[in-house]
């Protein structure tokens, strides 16, 4: 049996590259990242990969014990899609 108790949920909307992490992560016990998006290859690498890496590192620096990354699964998609910035960015964040 799985149970979950949420005392408080704060949703942060903003630019992860310019976040005030003291304000965003102060008192947090977990982080859930739903960062992701589409655009040019460069934009997808930055949003799906680099932005999530920044968030992971910030959580780590603040000593937050849990980080949940909403990622992607390939579902047997064609290889040209799997090498796109969307998938490669998400994979970079998973490492």
Image: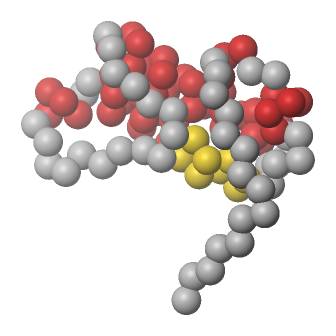
Tell me where residue 12 sits by quadrant.
Answer: top right
Counting from the top left corner in percent of width and height, residue 21 is at 81, 28
Q: Residue at x 42, y 35 (%)?
A: 90
Tell me where residue 83 sits by quadrant.
Answer: top left
Picture layout, residue 81 above or below residue 70: above
Left of 87 or right of it: where is 11? right
Nearer to us in this view, 44 or 24: 24
Left of 35 or right of it: where is 28? right
Left of 43 or right of it: where is 93? right
Q: Residue at x 71, y 72 (%)?
A: 5
Residue 95 visible from this viewpoint:
no
> How many numbered tags mark residues here?
0
Counting from the top left corner in percent of width and height, residue 32 is at 61, 47
Counting from the top left corner in percent of width and height, residue 51 is at 57, 25
Residue 28 visible from this viewpoint:
yes
Left of 2 or right of it: where is 11? right
**Colour mode of the rendering:** secondary structure
Q: Residue at x 55, y 89 (%)?
A: 1
Nearer to us in this view, 94 or 43: 43
Counting from the top left corner in percent of width and height, residue 67 is at 65, 50
Q: Residue furthest left?
A: 78
Picture layout, residue 28 above or below residue 86: below
Q: Residue at x 63, y 18 (%)?
A: 15
């Amino acid at each position: 049996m799985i149970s979950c108790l949420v005392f408080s949920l704060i949703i942060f909307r903003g630019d992860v590259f310019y976040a005030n992490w003291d304000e965003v992560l102060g008192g947090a016990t977990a982080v859930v990242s739903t960062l992701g998006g589409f655009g040019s290859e460069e934009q997808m690498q930055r949003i799906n990969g680099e932005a999530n890496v920044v968030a992971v590192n910030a959580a780590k620096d603040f000593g937050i014990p849990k980080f949940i990354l909403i990622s992607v699964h390939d579902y047997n998609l064609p290889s040209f899609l799997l090498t796109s910035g969307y998938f490669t960015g998400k994979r970079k964040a998973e490492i």
